[in-house]
Structure formats: structure tokens, C-alpha cells
Image: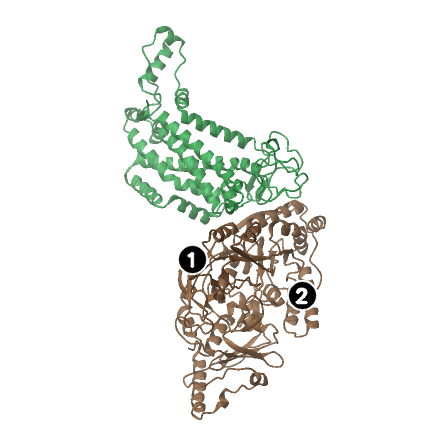
Chain colours: A brown, B green
């Protein structure tokens, strides 16, 4: 099961030999947690297995915490203490650790499966998860079929089969639901919600507006290098008008990057008011009295933050033309290419992108976009924002977090690496006879808790086709939702809520200063194809994302956007450009 | 002096059509009296051809439709063009008369939301014509508005400026390059003929629309590149037609005579062979323009022609295709414009074929 070097193999052999000796002596001491927190945890007994070789990553020493060129993340080491106990050593306290570790990109995979299927990327089209559904077939471009996993450790899926379909047209999705060809749809259009609510055989579930649309720009590329130009863009977009005319109920114009329903999201100064005259003056001051030409890139994929991409892009371009004389040519890009271009900072003009909450913590919004691991989304991270976010993310005190996020929000407003637009409300809709349907506030609906009336297949239609089945290297919500049906992380989010609750771990408990988290794994958890869950699977699944030099750091595009976004960076981070 | 028209008229009739083989035929009439011959207008290739075309009802209808579209395009209003610097729109600010004749009542790229006199305008608002009973309080838009509160009639009218010339340009490219390849291959023959025709066979082996998509994406997603792509995939058709004509014409006596008189190969090709190969080219070209308009609209529909703000019919349909049942006017009206254009070219092409092909002369 090991993935690592000869040195780690020797270490593992030594540990195994010790385990044999200890096992022969029948001493329970070898499995006793060493820290008070660990001993206090509601741990699952961790019986020693004679053949088990517990791993650690890095194998022989902690990763440095004081040299960002070697380790920019908050992780110091991931250790398999025994077959069913994992310890995460952190460089700094992380109050949102459980929420982060519960996220779909941190799903646990079998080590042998990773080794066999990552290098050739066959992992992108095949799965070996632990979730309630297992992949039956994926007819690319048309549908994805799943069937209930008989060996699932938890409650069996209430509907034996699950089918994913997709359409980027809100009206098409609504028509499919009304016609009865699907059981549930995501993001009905603003015009269709009334139709659904007035239909006695259908029901609409409102999703809180936990998403943000912004107009991004690379601050290292002209003319966005000039802060006045960026401010002018921010002040020239009529956010309220966009919300009034293109967004469904529950949406609002964005005053802060983080929606206000998330604690610490809306502290500090509000965003710039819509002020075309002031915007024009700033642009003139920057040397562009008559505007300039640029592009506004976007993708056709409908999201809660972007319910009608072409229409909203057109409206924003019209605002820029009318208020600033900027001619923004609309550049519709393929979804996967667009995300990659935006992430690596290769878009020269403006781009329209957004973010939906993965977990309800301000770090999920701010750290991912502006933290030390945010990469080149906006060209570069700003030091003062990074510092404030680091303080906020490592503090357990509400007062300290409020102060830190006030500083961060004010710095974001001052630097204007993007122009805020809206928090998009959304929802999903189901046939009325689907029992247990709900809309997750973070868009991660789990269908195994739903019963599709008397039918044996629940058909779900979402906005777009999943990009792959390896979600460690995906950031697209439609892809993550498909993964969530088949894969599990140590923790998950409660049904219909945002609280992190145990999944593959029975519990994860921190030490006193929140720098060591010890997780006890559920025993007897089987992977769909082969393998049984153990602590090395956890180490390997996360280590390959953490370390850019790990031989299995391959993924789909190789960007692995989420890990640095969640945990501040990488081991062996790529050199700053 | 009096014998000259007689000679000209006699020659035209005797050839079965001025311009040589394959040319339009003006069948020799009954034996003319000397008076009638003296008063008859001299025969002319182009006049005879036009008269022959106008006798075809389908050509008349096609010409009428296309003339209508050309007039609509010319009188649409101030210039709105795409350049390397983006969309350049010559319309003045909202509420200012652009001057001159302009069929489009509004700037086709301007969202009317919030403009004076447009209060209460809704997304995808249906057509509103006050004379037909639409409430006076509601802003008048005879085709309704699209999803960005833009006047649909103005956009459809401006679409004429994009789509009609697009077909001409794409087929112009195909005819120009196809004619050169076909003429060279047919006249020179040998290994060059073989090579060029095999290349044409390879091009023909690809599904044309798919090839057009590939070329457009490879060159860059702009309308100009889409035109070039549609032109490139059309080349083999014209190359083969011209080659076949050249192969047949180069053996004629008048070509041999030219050669005997010492005319160069290029001169023979340009002055003797090509003019006599034009008829099938014109017929196929006219029919091909309709197909090209459709292909360009298809490329715009799938979003490979660049800026979606440009009022192009295929792109307009693509952006609102989901509204077919909720707001059918935004989908059907640009669709009708495409249909009308393609129909116009096809009817004209059919008429030209009937008029110019001697085998179909009745």
C-alpha cells in the first residue's frame, strides 16, 4: 500500500516489525494515543494488524513551517498512527479544519487504486470510492448511471439507481421536469420558478444565496496594473440592476466578497457604490479618458452565481461601454479551458467567474481567492490580505477573527483584484413524490437519502456534465456533486445543512492549541472495486495533493486548485512567477 | 451598315447561344422579314441571359427576396462592425436621431433597460405594435425584445448585413480558389491534375461542417475565420466543376485555333477556356451561397464565430434557444430571416440553372 521511497519502506518495515512484537505481547499500549486530546477522543479501538505498515508523510521528518519556498501550506505532517488512526500535524491552528477536511476534493481513495490508476489518468473515468453509489456507466456527453453500493457502511440508498443528466439551458431542465422525464433539476431559471411553484406535482427548494459573482482581472497585466482602472471597473457596474433583472429571488447585490450569512463575511467597509461619474474620472486619471478595448471572457455553464451567462456578460459589457467607453468583446470559452485559464492567470482581459460556498466558513471564500495559496487568479496574492487571512484563519477568538477579516475585507476593497457583482440565490426542484428532497446551501445534495416515489431510478438533471471522477483536482461544482455520490471524506456536511459531521472518520479531535488533529477511522469500510479503508489510504490521498513533487500529483489538469486554496499552499510549491 | 446587325443576330442564333458551347441559348426564331430584322435590337449575351433568367418564375421570386434583403441591409442604419478592436458602433447616444434612412429604430447592440420611454420593458417582451392594439403605455417593439432588453427587429435587420454578405464572401473564396485549382488541373493535366484532385478528394472526405468547425477553432474563433473556413470546405466542389468544364472545352476547335495562332497557354486559359466554363460555376455558386449562409449561421449557433454581441442570426438563436416555448418570438424571428435568405438564394440558383443550362432549355 505504500507509495513512497525506499527510505519510507524501511521505516514502514521497522514499524511493522515493532507492531508484530507488540502484538505478540498482546499489549494495548501500542494503540494508545499519546496526547491528552487523543486519549480524550471518542476513538474507535484500533487493533493492531501484524501486516500493517503505518506510513507518514513526509516519511522521516516534519515539513518545514518557516520556509514558504519549501512548504507554503499549514500542514506539517500527516501520520498513520495505526491502521485506523491518522494524525494531522499543522504549522498553525486551523479553526475550520473539520469543515475543510470534509470537502469533496479531500475524498479518501485506496492507495493501491491511486498507484494503479493515477499515472495513466484512468482514475478520471473510473472510480473506487466508498460512497453509497457506485458508477455503473458513463456515456460521455449524455448521462452518468450509478447504482447503490451493496457493501456501503451506512444506510443503503433509498433509490436503487441514480442517473445524472445535464443541460446548460434552464428552460430545458424545467421542461424535462414538467414532462416527467427527470425527477429533479438544479437551478431552474428565474422565469421558471413561478411555473414550478404553481405546479401541484412539483416542488421548489430554495437555496440560500451563498455564492458570489465577480469580474476578475490579472493585476500583473496592463491596464489592470493600475489600481484606478480596477476601481473604475468596480464602480461602473450597476450591480443592483443586474440582480433585479437577471437573478432569481433570494439574490442580492454583493457588498462584500463573502455572503453575509457566513460569519465574519461582512465586516469592514462595504464595496464601492455604483457611481459612473466617479468611475469615469478615475479612468481619465489613469490615462484612458475615452476607454479602451478589451475582452470579457466567460463560460456558458449556468451556476447559482451566474444564472444566465451570456445575458449577464452582455449587460456588464454594456455598462462598461456606456459608463466608461470600454469596448469589451464577449469571449465565450469552453468550460474546462476557461477555468484553467482563469486559475493560471492567462486571461488578458476581464473574466466573469464566481464561487459557491463549499463550507460555511469565511476561509472558504477569502483564503481560496486571496490567501497565500490562491495562485495567479488575480495575478498574485497581496501580502497584506494574505497576512490578515492567516491571522483570521488561525484564531479561535471571535474578536480576533472580526478584526482580521475587517482588515482583509478593507484590503480587498483597496486593491480591487476583482469587481464584485452579486450573491446569487438559487434552488432545485423535484417531483412532489420524491421523498427527502432538499437543496443543500452549499450545492452538495446527496441523493441516497431521497426516494423517487415507486420508481427504482432517480434521475437528476444538473447544469453541466462532470469533468472527471477524480475530484482532488477539480473545482467545478457539477463535477464535485457527482463525486459526492461515490466518494467520501473523513467528515461530511449534514443533510440540508453545513455542519461538518463524521463520515469515514468516527471522530477527529484537536489538541489544546488546535495544531494536532487526530482522526479515528471507521472500521470495515470497503471500497467499491477493491480494498478496505485504512489510515495509509488517508495519508496517501491527501499527501499526493499536498506535495507537488509527489509522483502521483497528476490529477486532471494538474492544477490541484483546492488543496492550496483550503490549506494555504503546498509542499514543494511551484516557484512564484 | 445594315448588314452588321443581321450578321450579329445570325451568329447568336446560329451558335445556339452567344458565348459558345454551354452558353445561354436564344433559339433561332422563325424566318425574319427584312423589316423586322432591321428594327430588331442587336443580340447581347448578357441581355439574352437576363431575359432567360427573368422568364424563370423561381428566379424572379429569388431575385425579389434577395433584392429585398439587400435593400434592408443597406438601409438598416449607421455602421455597426466588428474590427480587431472589437465592436465599433456608429449609432449616436440613445434618443438622438442617427440621421438618414434607418430601418432599425434602435441601436441593435444597446440594452434599452432604463432608457427614457422604455419604462416597464420586460426581458423577452413579446412584439408590441400600437396600431394592432398593444397598449400605448407599453414601449413599441414590433419584434419584441431579447434577453438583454435589445430591440429584436433592429437586431434582425442588422443581421442581414452580416449574413447575406457572409454567404457571398465564403462562396467567393471557394470559387476563386476552386476555379484556379480546377483550371490548372484540367488544362495542364498529368501528375499535377492527379495531385490536386487527390487533395480535393481528401477535403471532400471530411464532413464539411465538422471541417469548418475545426478550421475556425484552429484559426481563431472569429466571424472572418468562419467565412474562410466555409470557403475552404467549399473549394473542392468548384475545383471539380471547373476542371470538368476545362477538360471538355480545351479540346474545342476555337481553342485549337487560338493555340495555332500562337496564343500562350495562360492566355488561352484566361481568354478562351474560362469564359466558357462560367455557366455551371454561376449556377453552383448561387446555390452554394444559401448553403454557406446556413453553415455560417450554424457556426455562430455553436459559438465559434467570436463576439456574441454582433447581431448575427445564428448567434441570436443560440443565446435564447431555451426560450422556444416561453418566448418563441426571440427564436423564430431570426430563424425566419435565415430561412428567407436561404430560400432566396436557392430559388435564384434553381432559376439560373434552368435558364443557363442548355440541357434544361424548354
Closest to the observer, A40 or A119: A40
Which subunit holds the residue at mark 2? Answer: A
Residue B1 appears anywhere in the view: no
Sequence order check: which comes first, mark 1 or mark 2? 1
Closest to the observer, A373 or B340: B340
Q: In the image, residue B172 lies at what x, y percent?
A: 43, 35
Between circles 1 and 2, the one closer to the viewer is 1
Closest to the observer, A93 or A278: A93
Residue at position x 69%, y 60% in the image: A414
Categorize mark 2 by other alpha carbons within 10 Å: few (<14), some (14-19), many (20+): many
Task: Check disc 2 and report its element: helix, strand or loop.
Answer: helix
Q: Which residue is the site of mark 1?
A: A143
When the figure is inspected, residue B228 is found, relative to residue A79, above or below; the finding is above
Mark number, residue B128: none
Closest to the observer, B51 or B83: B51
Q: Which residue is the site of mark 2?
A: A408
Alpha carbon distance from label 1 to label 2: 43 Å
Q: In the image, residue B8 lies at what x, y percent?
A: 36, 15
Q: In the image, residue A346 lies at what x, y percent?
A: 54, 57
Same chain for marks 1 and 2? yes
Q: In the image, residue B296 lies at what x, y percent?
A: 46, 41
Amino acid at each position: 500500500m505504500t507509495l513512497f521511497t525506499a527510505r519510507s519502506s524501511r521505516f514502514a518495515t521497522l514499524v511493522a516489525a515493532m507492531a508484530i512484537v507488540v502484538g505478540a505481547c498482546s499489549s494495548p499500549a501500542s494503540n494508545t494515543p499519546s496526547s491528552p486530546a487523543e486519549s480524550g477522543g471518542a476513538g474507535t479501538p484500533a487493533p493492531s494488524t501484524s501486516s500493517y505498515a503505518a506510513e507518514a508523510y513526509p516519511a522521516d521528518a516534519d515539513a518545514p513551517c518557516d520556509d514558504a519556498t519549501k512548504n507554503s501550506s499549514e500542514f506539517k505532517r500527516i501520520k498513520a498512527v495505526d491502521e485506523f488512526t491518522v494524525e494531522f500535524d499543522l504549522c498553525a491552528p486551523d479553526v475550520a479544519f473539520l469543515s475543510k477536511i470534509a470537502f469533496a476534493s479531500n475524498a479518501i481513495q485506496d492507495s493501491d487504486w491511486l498507484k494503479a490508476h493515477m499515472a495513466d489518468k484512468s482514475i478520471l473515468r473510473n472510480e473506487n470510492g466508498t460512497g453509497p453509489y457506485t458508477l455503473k456507466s458513463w456515456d460521455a456527453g449524455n448521462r452518468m448511471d450509478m447504482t447503490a453500493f451493496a457493501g456501503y457502511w451506512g444506510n443503503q440508498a433509498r433509490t436503487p439507481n441514480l442517473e445524472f443528466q445535464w443541460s446548460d439551458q434552464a428552460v430545458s431542465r424545467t421542461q424535462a421536469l414538467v414532462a416527467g422525464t427527470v425527477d429533479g433539476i438544479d437551478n431552474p431559471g428565474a422565469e421558471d420558478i413561478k411555473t414550478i411553484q404553481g405546479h401541484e406535482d412539483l416542488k421548489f427548494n430554495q437555496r440560500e444565496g451563498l455564492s458570489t459573482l465577480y469580474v476578475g482581472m490579472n493585476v500583473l497585466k496592463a491596464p489592470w496594473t493600475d489600481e484606478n482602472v480596477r476601481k473604475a471597473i468596480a464602480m461602473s457596474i450597476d450591480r443592483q440592476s443586474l440582480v433585479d433583472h437577471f437573478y432569481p429571488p433570494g439574490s442580492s447585490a454583493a457588498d462584500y466578497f463573502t455572503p453575509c450569512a457566513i460569519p465574519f463575511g461582512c465586516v469592514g467597509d462595504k464595496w464601492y457604490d455604483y457611481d459612473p461619474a466617479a468611475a469615469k474620472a478615475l479612468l481619465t486619471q489613469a490615462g484612458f479618458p475615452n476607454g479602451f478595448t478589451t475582452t470579457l471572457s466567460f463560460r456558458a455553464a449556468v451556476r447559482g452565481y451566474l444564472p444566465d451567462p451570456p445575458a449577464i456578460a452582455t449587460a456588464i459589457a454594456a455598462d462598461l461601454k456606456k459608463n466608461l467607453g470600454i469596448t469589451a468583446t464577449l469571449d465565450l470559452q469552453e468550460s474546462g479551458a476557461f477555468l484553467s485559464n482563469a486559475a493560471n492567470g492567462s486571461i488578458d482581459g476581464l473574466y466573469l467567474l464566481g464561487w459557491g460556498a463549499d463550507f460555511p466558513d469565511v476561509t472558504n471564500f477569502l483564503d481560496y481567492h486571496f490567501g497565500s495559496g490562491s495562485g495567479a487568479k488575480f495575478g498574485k496574492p497581496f501580502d497584506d490580505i494574505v497576512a490578515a487571512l492567516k491571522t483570521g484563519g488561525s484564531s479561535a477568538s471571535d474578536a480576533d477573527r472580526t478584526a482580521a477579516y475587517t482588515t482583509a475585507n478593507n484590503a480587498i476593497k483597496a486593491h480591487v483584484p476583482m469587481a464584485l457583482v452579486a450573491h446569487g440565490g438559487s434552488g432545485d426542484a423535484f417531483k412532489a413524490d420524491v421523498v427527502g428532497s432538499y437543496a443543500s446551501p452549499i450545492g452538495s445534495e446527496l441523493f441516497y437519502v431521497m426516494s423517487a416515489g415507486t420508481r427504482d431510478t432517480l434521475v437528476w438533471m444538473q447544469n453541466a456534465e462532470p469533468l472527471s471522477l477524480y475530484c482532488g483536482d477539480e473545482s467545478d461544482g457539477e463535477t464535485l456533486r457527482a463525486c459526492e455520490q461515490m466518494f467520501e471524506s473523513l467528515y461530511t456536511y449534514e443533510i440540508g445543512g453545513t455542519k461538518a459531521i463524521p463520515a469515514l472518520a468516527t471522530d477527529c479531535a484537536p489538541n489544546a492549541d488546535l495544531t494536532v488533529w487526530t482522526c479515528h477511522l471507521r472500521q470495515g469500510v470497503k471500497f467499491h472495486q477493491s480494498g478496505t479503508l485504512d489510515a495509509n489510504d488517508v495519508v496517501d490521498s491527501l499527501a499526493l495533493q499536498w506535495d507537488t513533487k509527489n509522483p502521483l500529483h497528476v490529477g486532471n489538469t494538474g492544477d490541484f486548485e483546492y488543496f492550496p486554496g483550503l490549506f494555504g499552499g503546498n509542499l514543494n510549491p511551484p516557484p512564484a512567477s | 451598315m445594315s448588314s452588321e446587325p443581321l450578321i450579329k443576330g445570325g451568329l447568336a442564333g446560329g451558335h445556339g447561344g452567344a458565348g459558345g458551347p454551354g452558353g445561354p441559348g436564344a433559339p433561332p426564331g422563325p424566318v425574319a422579314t427584312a423589316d423586322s430584322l432591321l428594327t430588331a435590337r442587336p443580340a447581347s449575351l448578357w441581355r439574352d441571359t437576363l431575359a432567360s433568367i427573368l422568364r424563370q418564375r423561381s428566379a424572379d421570386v429569388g431575385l425579389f427576396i434577395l433584392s429585398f434583403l439587400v435593400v434592408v441591409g443597406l438601409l438598416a442604419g449607421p455602421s455597426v462592425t466588428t474590427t480587431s478592436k472589437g465592436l465599433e458602433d456608429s449609432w449616436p447616444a440613445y434618443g438622438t436621431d442617427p440621421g438618414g434612412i434607418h430601418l432599425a429604430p434602435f441601436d441593435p447592440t444597446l440594452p434599452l433597460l432604463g432608457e427614457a420611454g422604455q419604462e416597464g420593458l420586460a426581458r423577452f417582451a413579446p412584439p408590441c405594435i400600437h396600431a394592432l392594439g398593444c397598449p400605448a403605455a407599453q414601449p413599441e417593439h414590433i419584434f419584441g425584445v431579447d434577453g438583454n432588453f435589445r430591440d429584436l427587429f433592429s437586431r434582425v435587420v442588422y443581421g442581414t448585413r452580416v449574413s447575406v454578405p457572409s454567404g457571398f464572401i465564403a462562396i467567393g473564396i471557394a470559387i476563386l480558389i476552386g476555379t484556379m485549382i480546377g483550371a490548372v488541373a484540367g488544362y495542364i493535366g498529368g501528375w499535377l491534375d492527379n495531385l490536386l484532385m487527390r487533395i480535393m478528394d481528401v477535403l471532400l472526405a471530411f464532413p464539411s461542417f465538422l471541417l469548418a468547425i475545426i478550421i475556425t477553432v484552429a484559426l481563431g474563433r472569429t466571424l472572418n475565420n468562419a467565412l474562410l473556413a466555409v470557403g475552404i470546405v467549399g473549394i473542392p466542389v468548384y475545383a471539380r466543376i471547373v476542371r470538368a468544364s476545362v477538360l471538355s472545352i480545351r479540346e474545342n476547335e476555337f481553342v485549337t485555333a487560338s493555340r495555332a495562332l500562337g496564343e500562350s497557354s495562360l492566355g488561352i486559359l484566361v481568354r478562351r477556356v474560362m469564359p466558357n466554363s462560367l455557366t455551371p460555376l454561376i449556377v453552383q455558386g448561387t446555390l452554394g451561397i444559401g448553403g454557406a449562409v446556413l453553415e455560417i449561421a450554424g457556426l455562430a449557433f455553436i459559438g465559434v464565430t467570436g463576439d456574441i454581441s454582433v447581431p448575427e442570426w445564428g448567434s441570436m438563436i443560440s443565446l435564447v434557444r431555451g426560450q422556444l416555448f416561453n418566448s418563441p418570438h426571440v427564436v423564430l424571428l431570426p430563424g425566419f430571416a435565415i430561412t428567407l435568405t436561404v430560400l432566396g438564394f436557392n430559388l435564384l440558383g434553381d432559376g439560373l440553372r434552368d435558364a443557363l443550362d442548355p440541357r434544361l432549355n424548354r
